[in-house]
Amino acid sequence: MKKILTLFLVSILLLTACSSETKTGGATDGTKSTNEITVWTWDPNFNVKAMKIAEEFYKKENP
């Protein structure tokens, strides 16, 4: 059981270390970064209303 757990942990470590994705928070392909946020919602009575309220609040704080 110890060997399986050790192999599992080593595999996760190697896969994490070999990740090629960069997380810089900006565009890395030479394109200009935009200040656009995309939100997917599914419930018009809850999610959509909450996002509309959040949008109004954000616009007040960041004109």
Image: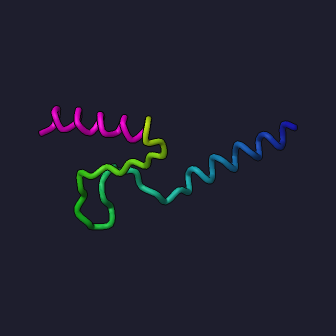
Q: Residue at x 23, y 51 (%)?
A: 35
Extreme front residue here? 45
Q: Residue at x 69, y 46 (%)?
A: 10
Q: What kind of secondary structure does the magenta stretch mostly adopt?
A: helix
- Residue 6 against residue 11 in the figure, above or below: above
Query: Residue 29: image x %, image y %?
Result: 32, 66
Q: How many marks?
A: 0
Looking at the rendered image, the quarter that the N terminus falls into is top right
In this rendered view, identify the residue nearer to me: 7 or 31.
31
Lateral position of residue 33 relative to residue 15, left or right: left
Extreme left residue here? 63
Extreme bottom residue here? 30
Lateral position of residue 41 relative to residue 62, left or right: right
Q: Residue at x 17, y 32 (%)?
A: 61
Q: Where on the picture, by quarter, is residue 63?
A: top left
Query: Residue 53: image x %, image y %?
Result: 29, 34
Question: Does the magenta segment cover residue 47?
Answer: yes
In this rendered view, identify the residue nearer to me: 7 or 26.
26
Question: Does the magenta segment cover residue 53?
Answer: yes
Extreme right residue here? 1
Lateral position of residue 33 relative to residue 4, left or right: left
- Give the magenta range: 46-63
Lateral position of residue 2 relative to residue 31, left or right: right
Query: Residue 36: image x %, image y %?
Result: 27, 52
In this rendered view, identify the residue nearer to me: 33 or 55.
55
Query: Residue 58: image x %, image y %?
Result: 22, 36
Q: Residue at x 66, y 47 (%)?
A: 12
